[in-house]
Amino acid sequence: MSKEGSLGAPIRHPINFEHPDFLNPEKLDTEMRRVFDICHGCRRCFNLCDSFPKLFDMIDDSKNEDVESLSSDQFAPVVDACTLCDMCFMTKCPYVPPHDFDLDFPHLMLRYRTAQKKLGKLPNVPAQLAQIDRNAKIGIMFSKFINWASNVKNKLIRKILEFITGIDKTVQLPKYNSETFSNFVKRNNDKINKETSLNQRKVVIYSTCFVNFNKKNTGVAALKVLKKNGVEVQEAYPGCCGMPFLEQAELSKVVEQAKKVSKDLIKWIDKGYKVVTLTASCGLMLKFEWPLFLPNDEQIKKLSANVMDIDEYIVDIANNEGLASGLKEIDGGVTVHHACHARAQNMGIKARDMLKLIPNIKIDVVERCAGHGGTFGVMKETYELAKKVGRPTARQIKTKNNKYMASDCPLAGKHLKQLEEDTNIINDEALHPIELVAKSYKL
C-alpha cells in the first residue's frame, strides 16, 4: 500500500527525451492531467512559486472545480511560471518516486516546454541568451562598452534594449570581466603553501561560464584559498554546462555540452584530480542532471562521482586534514542565501558549514527561492513574477540585519540585493561564500 512521504531520498528517472512517448501530445496531456489532479488534491506547494497558485486558481474557477474541466490550452501559464528550481521535488512533494504516484513536477514542466519548443511556441530571445559561450566572447572583447551600455542608469539605451529584446529595462544585468578567469589563472604566479599537510590534494577548477566571463573574483578567491591550503590547482573551461539550454528546453544541446565538457574533465580525473565547481547550477548539472540525460555513459557517471562544490570541498579539507591557520574574524555578520540549486545537490548547507570555520562569525541562513530562474528573472514578460517570488526571501535577508550577503548562485544574489536595496549590506550583490573565506585569510 502506498504511504505519503518516504524516509528514502527522492529518485529521479532518466530524461529519455528521444523516446516517441516523450513528446506524444496525447500521452503528455494525459500525464499533465494526472499530475495536476494529484497536486490539486494535495496543495502543499501552494506557496513555493506561482505555478501552483495559477493551477489551483484555474481549477477552482473551472466549471466543475476539477482538472477535467480544464482545457489543454490552459496549461501553458502553469508551465511558464516554473523556473525549474526543483524545490517542490526536493523539499515539499510527498509523492515523488519511489512513491507509486511517481510525481516529478519540474521535469514534467520541462517535458511540456520541450513540446512547446518543437512547435515553435517559445520566444527566441531567451534562446539566444542561452548561447553563453558565443555571447561571452563578444562581452569580454567589448566589456567596457557593454557594461556601460547595460547599466540601469543608462536609461535611454536600456529602454531601446527592452524594446528590441524584451529584457526589462530596470533589471541589473551581470557585468562582463575585462579578461576571462582562465586567462587570469595562466598569469597567476601565487605559490602553493607547502607548510600544510595537503600536498597530496589536487583539484581542477571547472570555472563555470559565470565565473569565467562575469565574476572573476569568485574564481580568484577559490584559487587563493586552495593554494593557501596546499592544494595543487589547475583550471579548465571546455564550455558551458548547458543549464541555460535546459531552461530553454533545448535538450539535445544539453547532451552536446555534457559530452564536450566531460571529455575534457575526465582527463583530469584520470590524473588524480577532483573537479571543483564554483556555481551551484553548474555543480547540479554535472552531479545530477547530466547522468539523467546520459544514464548509460560511464564517463558521465565517473565525472559525477568526482565533482564537488567549492564549499563542499573546503569543508571536506576542514573535516579531514584541517584548514591552514590564519583565518581571522571579519567585520560583520553574514546572511547565507541557500540557493535552490545548492539545496538540490542534497549535500547540506555547505556554505554555512564553511563560513562557520571563520572565528566568531555571526551567520544566518535563509532557505527560500530567489525567484530569478535564469532568463525568467530578466525578461520583461516574467520579471514582475520573479520579483513576486523573490520579495519574501529578500525581506527575510533584510531582517537579519547583517553586513554581508552570500549565495552560491550569483544571479539569485544579484536579484535579491536589487529587491531590497535599503539594507545595511555593503556589497552590491551577493558574494560567493568562498570570497568571505578569502577575506578572512586576508588574501
Image (cartoon, rainbow, N blue to C red):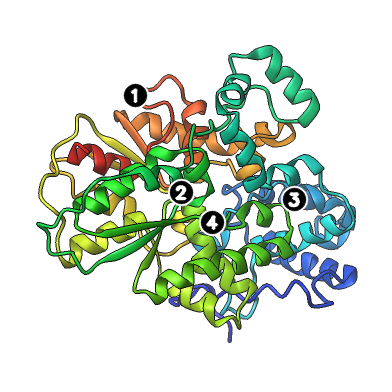
Instruction: Give SS at disc 2.
Output: loop
Q: Which residue is mark 2?
A: 339
Quadrant position of residue 112: bottom right
Structural distance between the alpha carbons of marks 1 and 2: 20 Å
- In the drawing, what numbered circle is on residue 78? 3
**Residue found at x 39% / y 47%:** 186
Mark sitting earlier along the chain (1/3) = 3
Mark sitting earlier along the chain (2/4) = 4
Structural distance between the alpha carbons of marks 2 and 3: 22 Å
Mark 1 or 2, which is nearer the eye? 1
Kind of residue sitting beneath label 3: Val
Q: Please say if the residues under marks 4 and 1 sit with CB atoms less than 8 Å apart.
A: no
- In the drawing, what numbered circle is on residue 426? 1
Kind of residue sitting beneath label 1: Ile
Q: Which residue is mark 4?
A: 87
Mark 2 or 4, which is nearer the eye? 2
Mark 1 or 3, which is nearer the eye? 1
Q: Please say if the residues under marks 1 and 3 sit with CB atoms less than 8 Å apart.
A: no
Instruction: Give SS at disc 4.
Output: helix
Image quadrant in which the C terminus is located: top left
Mark 4 or 1, which is nearer the eye? 1
Task: Please name whichever residue, 408 or 370, is drawn nearer the observer in this view of the structure.
Answer: 408
Task: Please name whichever residue, 114 or 46, is drawn nearer the observer in this view of the structure.
Answer: 114
Kind of residue sitting beneath label 4: Met
